[in-house]
Amino acid sequence: MLQNSWLIPLFPLLSFVLLLIFRKSKGEGTAWIGVLLTGLSLILSLGVWIAVWQGDGIKVEGTWFEIGERAITIGYEVNPLNALMLVIVSLVSFLVHLYSKGYMHGDERFPVFFAYLGLFSFAMLGLVLSPNLLQLYMFWELVGLGSFLLIGFYYFKSEAKAAAKKAFVMTRIGDVGLFIGMVLLFWQVGSFEYDEIFASVRNGDISSGMLTLTALCIFVGAIGKSGQLPLHTWLPDAMEGPTPVSALIHAATMVAAGVYLVAAMYPLFQASETALTVVAVVGGVTAIFAASIGLMQKDIKRVLAYSTVSQLGYMMLALGASGYVAGIFHLTTHAFFKALLFLAAGSVIHAVHTQNIDEMGGLWKKLRLTGPLFLIGALAISGVPLLSGFFSKDEILASTYADGRYGLFWLAVVAAFMTAFYMFRLFFLVFTGKPRGDQSGVHESPSVMTLPMIVLGVLAIVAGYLNTAWFGTFLTDFLAGGPVELAHGDHHGPSWIPIVATAASFLGIGLAYLIYKKGTLSRDWITRSLPGLSNVIYNKWYVDEGYDATFVKGTKGLSKLGVLFDKYIVDGLVAAVVSGVQGLSKVGSRIQNGQVQTYGTFAIFGIVILLLIVALTGGYFT
Amino acid sequence: MSSVPLAAYLTLALILFCIGLFGALTKRNAVIVLISIELMLNAVNINLVAFAKYSINPGLTGQIFSLFTITVAAAEAAVGLAILIALYRNRQTVNVDEMDTMKR
């Protein structure tokens, strides 16, 4: 099974190629190509996962080319971490393919959408299988391309176009960091191989300053891809893409690539205390920052987008706080419940044709399946006990506490409270109360859409039992087989942590209930009491505006200067040369008048001048 | 006999040549241009003859040479006039300003 794991990414690639060939076809049966091929990937991934579970692993490499004495290799590697990622990616990808069959029904570029999904899945699976940084980087960029194409799928909408460009540019800033880190590592180690990098890290071949620098550069790449502060602004805008795309790329897989990168390079980070602290602080601050924005958004998908940013911050916090397993665990559970939430949101949007939560309401009775599934997702992400989010979030909090980062710990608790609040604000506004918009044509989505949601719903409930203190820490044991040495065996901090976390989440849910369901508390009592702060939050902390005022305006100013330079100096030079040549040739053409006498006159003048020169200088021979 | 110095001959030749050159370059009438060229040729002849008499090795070579030149000049004048007549028949003018086919 393991020998065939290189086939996993190739199935979606095949689907991409096939669907490009059939891109003009009108029938929607083309979707089955994508579904079937990603299904094959899923089956293989599961097989690989089982094999790795039994303690196997594989690494196959061949020389790609040589530079001097250094061979650049290419190949594939399966270890516990990427086996888990393979399953997550191929599973969510498969379910999203299936879901899209219903969601994209009637779209003009139906096969193209599935082709792009295939391309993305190929890139993501390839990224996960890469045994070295160079290969990872190539897939990293391909993933970015897939994301770009899918965000801009509705390219005729100017917002979608702008969002696609923004995502591309913002992640590119991070990619430059990753690239620099990669080159630095190659310079220091002489190889892109994970194993060799880790070996020289262990042997202390790299100076500690350089270690920190490379780790931070690589983390910049992760910041870009995972939408961490300060490069998070592309992710909410990426919601312009079709909703299945948001579920697949901008919730479950691609944005998790940043977390995966940090996890895959974890020994490097472990070697530098500073790097770990930076990761933890960036993660923790992002978690609460994005959660605070999520409190006041009006667009159902944007709330979920900020929630994603916030949860990714949680994962980073966990990794930074030496909670390797906790980070991966949350990545897994988050992939399931966030994909579920997005698909459910997609189902809602599909039914009411709006994304504004002010125009929804009272959908519980009309969407008999979507409603409960959304509720499951919301409960899971809020960290309600016995659902998956509770276990993973608890583990993150515990490892943060055990690592001695108490400030970040309380930040994370507050973020958990906010998460519960905004999720249930969303839930109550969308599903309860009176309809606030036209809901005449509302009906439940077709089964091809509800089925993936049900699967994800089940997973959102049970995925948490992968790693619990009660039944067994399967995931910890599983990941312990990987290349990362788990420093602290388990992170079970004081027993009051789960209680605090649960209290925070129930507090959030309760508050949302009081405000948005019961109406006991007026909706704007916070807004009224703190108008300044709420205004800042409503405007997303003015980050976009800040970037606009500094980088965008700065670049525009620079380019205006450039235009002026081009117009007056470069063009001026050209014009000067042109008019010089033209003037000269005008004189020349005036002389060229066909009159023998004029020619003779000039010849005489020439001879006179030559003679004068000879006479004055005394001739050649002096 | 030798009271007239070489410089006088040469000056005469120079003046004659300059007049001829001026005429050849400025006159509009092709006949006058032709005559001016003859003038220049004769200035050269004077030089030849003068040097034949006054050079370090006086001899007859220069005088004979100028005889040849006069003969050739006569032939050339005949040819030049013939061309002029042909041109006049062709273009109905002897104005050199209008003879600018080289430009085209």
Image (cartoon, coloured by chain):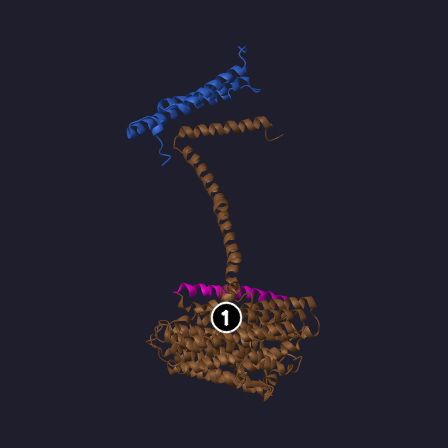
Chain colours: A brown, B blue
* Dominant secondary-structure state across the stretch colored magenta: helix
Residue A354's x, y, as percent? 39, 71
Tell me: residue A210, above or below residue A424: above
**Residue B2 horizontal/vertical position (percent):** 54, 11
Say if A67 sits above or below A323 in the image: above
The answer to which image quadrant residue A494 occupies is: bottom right
Tell me the SS state at disc 1: helix
Q: Where is residue A603 drawn, in percent x and y?
A: 46, 30
Splitting the image into 4 quarters, where does residue A361 fall? bottom left
Of A561 and B39, the residue lying toward us: A561
**Could you tell me which residue is drawn at 36 percent across and 32 percent down?**
B100
Give the chain of mark 1: A
For the C terminus of chain B, the image quarter is top left
Which residue position holds label 1? Answer: A294
* Residue at screen point 38% across, 33% down: A594
Depth check: give the residue in front, A311 or A325: A311
Mark 1 is surrounded, within 10 Å at the Cα level, by few (under 14), some (14 to 19) or many (20 or more) other residues, namely many
User: Would residue A182 be counted in the magenta stretch?
Assistant: yes
- Residue A457, percent across and down? 47, 83
- Left or right position of A608 against A112: right
Q: Is residue A273 visible?
A: yes
Q: Can I make out residue A143 in this image?
A: no
The amino acid type found where label 1 is placed reads: Gly
Span highlighted in magenta in the image: A156-185
Q: Nearer the viewer, residue A64 or A424?
A: A424
- Residue drawn at point x = 51 percent, y = 68 percent: A526
Residue A449: which quarter of the image? bottom left
In the visual, does A189 lie left or right of A355?
A: right
Number of callouts in the render? 1
Nearer to me, A221 or A464: A464
Which residue is drawn at the image coordinates 55% and 26% (left, top)? A612
In reply to whether residue A355 is colored magenta, the answer given is no
